[in-house]
Image (spheres, rainbow, N blue to C red):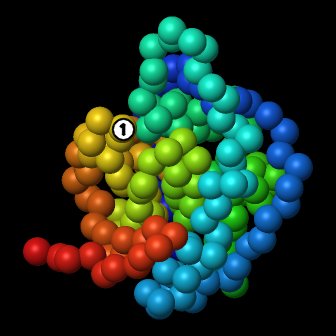
Amino acid sequence: MPCAVGTGGSMTSHLRAGRYIHRGKCLCVAFDATTRCRAIQALWSAAEVAHLWHAAPAGSYAVPVPLQVSAWLQDQFRFGGLQYLPDPEYCDEWCSPSRTLARGYGDCDDFAILTASMLEAGGLSVWVLVGQYGEQGHAWVEGYDEAGRPFMIEPTSGGLFTVRPHGYHPQLLTNPRDCQRAWVA
C-alpha cells in the first residue's frame, strides 16, 4: 500500500525515548476489507508500547495525549528512530507496534497501528482508518482527546490536525473491538 507523507511541528512530551526489545509479528495482508480489519485488530497492542509512557511530574501542565504522541513521532522521524520505508512489492506487510519499533521502519499501516496503540496506552479510544489519500492507499488515526475534541494524526510524519485535511478518504474504520465500512457521501 503506497502512503503519503505529511508534516508537523515538535514539542517535549511525557513519552520516553528508548530501546525496543520485544519483536512482534508481521502479516502479509490481502486487499479485502475483512482481512484488513482482522489484521489491524490482531496487531493493535497498547501493551507493546505502554513502556513508552511515564507519569507527568506532579503539578506539571497536562499535555493532551494526541499532542504527546504526535510530538514523539515527529522526534522519532526527525532524529532517525523511525524511517518511512514502503513494503516490498510481493507483500503488503503490516506489523505490530513492537516489531515496527524494533525494525525502526515501516509504512503508513505500520505507523497507524503503532500510533493507535500508543494513543490507547495513553488512555484514549481511537480508530485506524484505511482508505485513500489522493490516488494512493493510505492509513491514518482519528479519535477524540481527553476533552472530547476531535483529532487526526498522520502517522507517517506525526502531523496532528483538528480536522481531517482535504484528500483523505476513509473506506474502513477499525479499532480492537469493531470494524466498519466508512460512509461515503
Q: Residues within 10 Å of mark 1 (few under 14, many from 20)?
A: some
Residue 174 can be seen in this image: yes
Q: Is residue 36 above or below residue 120?
A: below
Q: Is residue 69 above or below residue 39?
A: above
Q: Amino acid type of disc 1? A: Glu
- Give left or right: position of 84 versus 158: right
Q: Mark 1 highlights which residue?
A: 146
Q: How many numbered markers are drawn?
A: 1
Q: Nearer the viewer, residue 120 or 158?
A: 120
- Give left or right: position of 11 versus 44: left
Residue 31, given in percent of the width and then of the height, sits at: 50, 87
In the image, farthest residue toward the front: 58
Residue 64, given in percent of the width and then of the height, sits at: 42, 30
Q: Nearer the viewer, residue 72 or 103?
A: 72
Quarter of the image with the C terminus in it: bottom left
Q: Residue at x 54, y 42 (%)?
A: 122
**Residue 58, quarter of picture:** top right
In the image, farthest residue toward the top: 59
Q: Residue at x 69, y 54 (%)?
A: 47
**Residue 173, quarter of picture:** bottom left
Residue 48, given in percent of the width and then of the height, sits at: 72, 54
Residue 130 can be seen in this image: no
Residue 169, given in percent of the width and then of the height, sits at: 28, 67
**Residue 181, quarter of picture:** bottom left
Q: Residue at x 27, y 42 (%)?
A: 148
